[in-house]
Image (tube, rainbow, N blue to C red):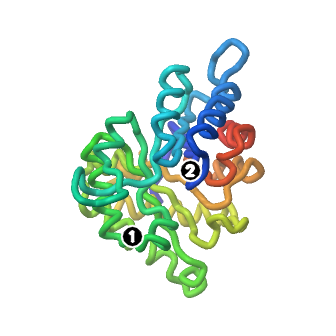
Amino acid sequence: MVETSKTSVLISGNWKMNQNHFEALKLIQELSALLRSLNGDSVLSPMTKVSIHPPFTSLRTVQTAVESDHIPVFLGAQTCHHLDKGAYTGEVSAEMLSKLGVQYVIAGHSERRQYFFETDEIVQKKVKAILHHGMHPILCVGETMEERQLGKANEKVQNQLREVFSQLSIEEALKVVVAYEPIWAIGTGETATSSDAEQMCSFIRTELASLSGNQVAEEALIQYGGSVNEQNAAELLAQENINGLLVGGASLDARKFVEICRA
């Protein structure tokens, strides 16, 4: 078993295809007010980092608010293309995101894999592009209910990790956040038990040691994502190998999201 010390926690709010830029401004302003005490200090623990991932059309609005109001969050994006430029109508490159001050980019979210047919190879290329432009990838891995019932959950996650980390240097691997999101718990209201989540996150940490060495495994931020809410956040974060949460629907409610961040 790989030992880990929780020196930091990363809570990421994935807004998905929600919040036009007017709504995004209102939400980030609500978050700003809730994240500060009366004297202006952050209400978060010094070890807690927060990233906000709006849709592309709201990135500039949120960036401006975060920078001008000194809101204690990092700007994030939900995906990117792996090439910097080209005839790829509708796509947004990692290079473009980096110029907007984005610091965290989600790669391989289960919805991207399922609905947009992103393969492990495509996800690996996106991770490399994100790293190349100085940002942190949040690499999503996880199994379907069928795979879990067939006893193939570990194999699925292992393959997803190997495709990416086998192509990374130790320096690159140290910058990757891994998010375990059981596909059967995304937007379904179902949540893996804290024990189930801990078991898989422990497995992920062991695999990281095998792929990239003990330093990477010990320092890796491993998030859990899948119907996270203000009721289950504290129990999940209490697990030894879970040091972050990837929050979907609950991140659209400023008060609920701040409660999760303070868990």
> In the rendered image, which quarter is residue 104 located in?
top left
Look at the image and tell me whether residue 189 can be seen: yes
How far apart are labels 2 and 1 at the CA level?
A: 18 Å
- Helix, strand or loop at label 1? It is loop
Compared with 103, 139 (above or below) is below
> In the rendered image, which quarter is residue 139 located in?
bottom left
Verify CB contact (< 8 Å) between mark 2 and mark 1.
Answer: no
Residue 118, label in figure = 1
- Reading the image, the residue beneath label 2 is 14
Q: For the view shown, which residue lies furthest in the bottom direction?
A: 150
Amino acid type, residue under disc 1 in the picture: Glu
Q: Residue at x 54, y 82 (%)?
A: 147
Residue 203, label in figure = none
Q: Residue at x 57, y 70 (%)?
A: 183
Asked whether 125 or 42 is in front, the reply is: 125
Q: Position of residue 251 (x, y in %)?
A: 65, 46
Q: Residues within 10 Å of mark 1 (few under 14, many from 20)?
A: some
Q: Is 139 left or right of 193, judged from the image as shown?
A: left
Compared with 135, 137 (above or below) is below
